[in-house]
Amino acid sequence: MRQEIQKLNGLLADKEREAINDKIAIADLGKKLNSALASRVQDLQKFRSEFFGQLKEILKNRSEVRVVGDRFIFQSEVIFATGQANISDDGKDQLANIASALREIEASIPRDIPWVLQIEGHTDSDPIGNSTFFRDNWDLSTERALSVVRFLRSEGISANRLAAAGYGEFQPIDRSNTVEAKQRNRRIELKLTQRVSAKN
């Protein structure tokens, strides 16, 4: 019986040592994974800065285009006619310049960095007048974002690097009820960001 107990104690000690080694290995693996993810995020930050630097140069004479944080904001009037989701000729010129800069950046970003250019549409709080084509502001903002995505795709940007979202009037940058505030809220935002999934 004593021999059996000693044998079991020995096995238990071995298992405890294995568990400690496994914990150390898992912690080490976690550190390596976090380091690798941080490196990828830093890489994306570098390319984002390069992309935004090029866009700033392209759009430097356009007062209706602003940089806010990590986003480029276009007033909707730059790209669309009132109540419309078809891109104007002037809007196509601006977006073609953006596509050119993005193609250059896309070619230099390593394939394993899961980046995406997110296009976000926003409207003011006025009820939509053109009910024939759009149910509401949400519908209009989404269709505008999709129009920009489709145009960039036609300019050679990879489809898996583009995303569209419409927010309607629900994320204003100016909550005043003035004409100027509503104009600021009618906008398209561009953001070079990281996809949730790391799969290419």
Image (cartoon, helix red, strand yellow):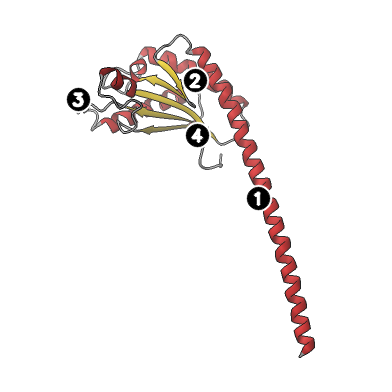
The residue that disc 1 covers is: 30
**Residue 86 sits in which quadrant?**
top left
> Where is 71 relative to 92, above or below?
below
> Where is 119 relative to 196, above or below?
above
Placement of the C terminus among the 4 image quadrants: top right
Q: Pointer 4: residues within 10 angstroms few (<14), some, or many (20+)? A: few
Residue at position x 62%, y 36% from top?
40
Q: Which mark is residue 99?
A: 2
> Mark 4 or 1 closer to N-term?
1
For the residue marked with disc 3, what is the amino acid? Gly
Q: Secondary structure at mark 4?
A: helix
Residue at position x 48%, y 21% from top?
155
> Mark 2 or 3 closer to N-term?
2
> Where is 178 relative to 195, above or below?
above
Estimate the x, y position of residue 138 in percent, counting from the top left.
29, 33
For the residue marked with disc 1, what is the amino acid? Gly
Q: Which mark is residue 160?
A: 4
> Mark 3 or 1 closer to N-term?
1
